[in-house]
Image (spheres, helix red, strand yellow):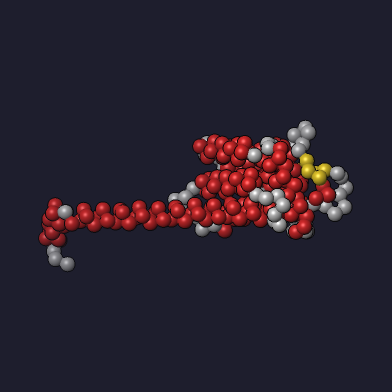
């Protein structure tokens, strides 16, 4: 279980250093699992009332999971199964569990009031890391496992944005204080008086 979180953290860190989107890289890994010669699958009955096949590739399963017609009961039991596999079997199910949350994560990030100086890749990294940690620790018998994962990501990105805004405010305040001190230096006051004398009093 610890291996799953560490793997996700390493993957996201590498993506960030290369300038790629962490969500985009995760999607590539997820789709590779779904389109391999022997694709990774999940039981179709979890998301379908009358499935035409026993199992669905994980990308099709996620599409059904996110579909408005899928009931809350189906979503709950699907998330329990995905997270249970991630906790008990490790990779690649850890990657699958985090990737299953991507459609919701995109909505969470779209609603976030992100400070201009905070890079989107950093926010994506924080969201994915939070989900990876939650996948490892969440109780699979909880009422709504998926909601627990989304809430963890939401808290993490809002905390990151809050810290970024506080830091920017501190830096702006420090810069203003430094400028004020410079303006009070004798040389600066004399230079200012010289400029006023040349151009006339205001």
> Residue at 54% across / 36% down in the picture?
14
98 horizontally vs 202: left or right: right
> Residue at 38% across / 56% down in the picture?
169
Q: Residue 141: where, in percent of width, then height?
A: 72, 52
47 horizontally vs 23: left or right: right
Q: Residue 139: where, in percent of width, then height?
A: 67, 50
- Which residue is at the front of the view, 180 or 146? 146
The residue sitting at the bottom extreme is: 202
> Residue at 86% across / 49% down in the picture?
51
Q: Residue 45: where, in percent of width, then height?
A: 83, 49
- Which residue is at the front of the view, 134 or 122? 134
133 horizontally vs 88: left or right: left
> Residue at 68% across / 37% down in the picture?
90
Number of marks: 0
Q: Residue 112: where, in percent of width, then height?
A: 54, 57
Quarter holding the C terminus? bottom left
188 horizontally vs 81: left or right: left
The residue sitting at the top extreme is: 37
- Which residue is at the front of the view, 63 or 190? 63
Let me know if residue 71 appears in the view: yes
- Quarter of the image holding residue 99? top right
Let me know if residue 31 appears in the view: no
Quarter holding the N terminus? top right
- Quarter of the image holding residue 5? top right
């Amino acid at each position: 279980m610890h291996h799953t979180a560490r793997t996700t953290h390493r993957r996201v860190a590498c993506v960030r250093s290369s300038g790629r989107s962490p969500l985009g890289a995760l999607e590539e890994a997820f789709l590779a699992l779904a389109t391999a010669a022997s694709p990774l699958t999940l039981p179709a009955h979890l998301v379908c009332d009358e499935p035409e096949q026993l199992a669905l590739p994980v990308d099709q399963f996620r599409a059904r999971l996110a579909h408005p017609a899928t009931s809350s009961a189906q979503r709950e039991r699907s998330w329990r199964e995905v997270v249970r596999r991630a906790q008990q079997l490790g990779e690649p199910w850890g990657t699958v569990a985090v990737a299953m949350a991507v459609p919701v994560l995109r909505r969470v990030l779209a609603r976030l009031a992100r400070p201009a100086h905070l890079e989107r890749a950093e926010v994506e990294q924080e969201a994915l890391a939070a989900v990876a940690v939650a996948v490892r620790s969440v109780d699979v018998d909880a009422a709504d496992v998926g909601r627990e994962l989304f809430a963890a990501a939401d808290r993490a990105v809002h905390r990151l944005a809050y810290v970024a805004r506080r830091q920017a405010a501190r830096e702006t305040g420090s810069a203003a204080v430094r400028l004020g001190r410079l303006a009070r230096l004798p040389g600066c006051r004399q230079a200012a008086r010289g400029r006023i004398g040349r151009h006339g009093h205001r």
